[in-house]
Image (cartoon, rainbow, N blue to C red):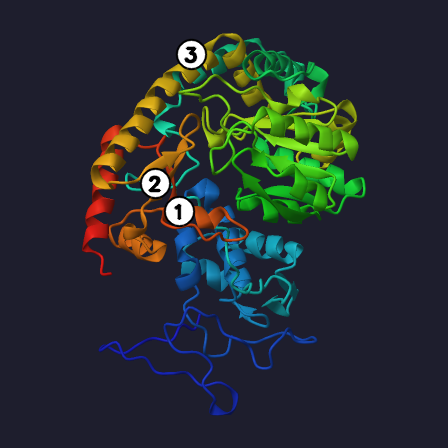
Amino acid sequence: MGVKRTNSDGAGAVPEGAGGAPTAAAGSDVLRTAVPAGPPDGGRHGAQPEGWTAAWELLLPSAGASPRGRGRALQAALRDAVRSGRLAPGTQLPASRELAADLGVSRGLVTDAYAQLTAEGYLSGRQGSGTWVTGAGAVPVPAATAMPAVDDRGGPTDLRPGLPDLSLFPRAAWSAAHRRVIARLPHRAFGYPDPRGLPELREALAELLARRRGVAADPDQVMVCSGVAQAHTLLGFVLRGRGERATAVEDPGSPEQSGLLGATGLTAVPVPVDEEGLSVTALAAAGVRSAIVTPCHQFPTGVAYSARRRAQLTDWARTVDGLVIEDDYDGDFRYDRAPVGALQGLAPGHVAYTGSVSKTLAPGLRLGWLVAPPDIIADAAARKRTMDLGNPVTEQAVLADFLTSGQYDRHLRRCQRLYRRRRDTLTTALAAHFPGATTSGIAAGLHAIVTLPPRYGPPSRLLSAATSAGITLRPLSDYEHAPTRVPGVRLVIGYAHLSPESITRAVELLARAESAAPR
C-alpha cells in the first residue's frame, strides 16, 4: 500500500507531497489527506501517491475480532475514527484491496464497511474516484459544562443529615416479594402503566397512610411518584398552570426547594419558622396562595407544629382558597412522643400530602406518593404522563406486596429500635466531649440540632477543624435564607446512617480537632 519504511535504527524519513511539502509523518495514525482535499470531479487515479501511512494502526484491533464479528468491528473502528476526527474531512481512504491486504482480512469485509459508512453519510465516493471522508460525521467537542454534584453522603465520619442506614435494606424480603410478584402479574400488567400508579399499590398506600399517619384519602386520590422531589415538581407545574407565580417555603428549610420550584416557573418565598412552626402572620403578608411545610418534624429545626399553628395554617388555606403542600419526610420515626398525625387529615381539600420510602427503605428506589384533591391529581397525572409515562410496574407491585404482607411494618419497627439507640449514642458522646452542648429536635426523625457554647466558635473555626480531621458537617446556617445572629455554634447532625461505634468515634475526632485548632 506504499507504507513508508523506516531504516534499521528506527528513524523514519518524512515523505514529500506536491511541491516538496511534507504530507504525513511516518508511523502516524492518520491516513493521507489528498492534495487538493476532497474527492476529484472525475477521472481515475493511477498508483497511490507516496505518503500513505500504515492504515492498520487505526484499524488493526478490528481485524483481531472473532470471524463473525469482524465486519461489524471494522465498521465501528472506521466510524469512530471519523467521528473523533482522527480521520479528518477530506481524507482519502486507501483502496479496498490495499487496506484488506494490510489488515489481513478479505476484501469483501472492507468493501462492505465502505458501503455501510457511505450509506450512513460518513464516507463518499464514486467508482473510479476513490473513497473520501465527509464532514457530516465529525462530532464537535462540546464545551466543558459543570456536571451535577454526586451525592457522596454516608462515610463513617460524615455527620450530614438526610440518609438512612442503607445496610438495613431488607434484601431477602424484597427479593422474595419480587419473585412472588413476577410469578403472579398478568401479561397485560407489563403494558404502559397508569401514570397515577398501579391500582393495588394505591390501595395499599391509602390503607397504610390512613392507619399510620391519619391521612384521609381513597385510592383515587393517591398517585405514585418518583419520590417527594417529583411530587413537588408536579405540584409546581400544576400551580403554575393555574396562574400561581410564587410559593412560600420554610426558613430555615430545605436548600433544594428554591431550585426545584424555579424549574417549574415558581419563585420560592422564604417565611420564618418559630417555636410553633411556620409563622402564619408572615405567610399571610407574603401574598402567596401555596406553601410547602414539614409540620410533623420541621426540617431542619425538628419543631413539631403546635395544634394552634396547624389550625391557623389550614384556616389560612381555606381563606385564600390555597394549597398547603405537606412534606412528611420522616413521619414514621418517633421516639419520645406520640406520633403526630398528618396535617392533611384536618383539611383534605386544601392540603396535598407527600411522602416516600427514601428514609424508611432507600432513596435509590425512587418511590413516593402524592395524596391530593381529585382535580389536582388529574392535572398532576396529565403532567406525569408527559414526563415519564409512569413508574416501573414491577417495583410498584413489589412495594404493594411489601405493604400488604406486613414486611414494611416489621422493617419500620426494626429501624426504629436501631435509630433510637444511635440517637442516644450521639447525645451521650456530645455530653462527654462537648460539655455544655444542647440538642433539640431529637424526639423524632433521623437528625438532631446541636448547639455548642460560644467557646467552641466561631463556626468557621469549628468547621475548618472538622474538615482537617476528615469530618463532614453542615451548620444550621446552610439551611437559612436569612442568617440569624444566635450565639454559639449550631449544627445539623445526621446519625441514622452511622453505627453507634462510628458516631462515638466521629464525635471524639471532632473534639480533638477542635481542641487543636488555633483560636
Give, as a three-letter code, the residue at label 3: Arg
Dot 1 or dot 3, earlier in sequence: 3
Q: How many marks?
A: 3
Residue type beneath disc 1: Arg
Q: Closest to the observer: 200 or 278?
A: 278
Instruction: Specify the quadrant that holds the N terminus.
Output: bottom left
Identified at 36% across, 48% down, the residue is 489
Tell me if residue 111 can be seen.
Answer: yes
Position of 313 relative to 150 (above/below): above
- Disc 2 is placed on an element classified as loop
Nearest the camera: 195 or 124? Answer: 195
Residue labelled with disc 3 = 410
Checking the image for residue 159, the label placed there is 2
* Residue holding disc 1: 474
What amino acid is at disc 2? Leu
Of the pair 482 and 92, the residue shown nearer to us? 482
Q: Is 491 positioned to the left or the right of 325 in the image?
A: left
Q: Quadrant of residue 188 in the image?
A: top right
Label located before the other in sequence (2 or 1): 2
Secondary-structure class at tag 3: helix
Q: Please provide percent x and percent y for residue 323.
A: 72, 33
Q: CA distance from mark 3 to mark 2?
A: 27 Å
Cβ atoms under marks 2 and 1 closer than 8 Å: yes
As measured in the structure, the alpha-carbon distance from the residue carrying label 2 to the one carrying label 1 is: 8 Å
**Residue shown at 42% from the left, 72% from the top:** 53
Horizontal and vertical percent for residue 247?
68, 43
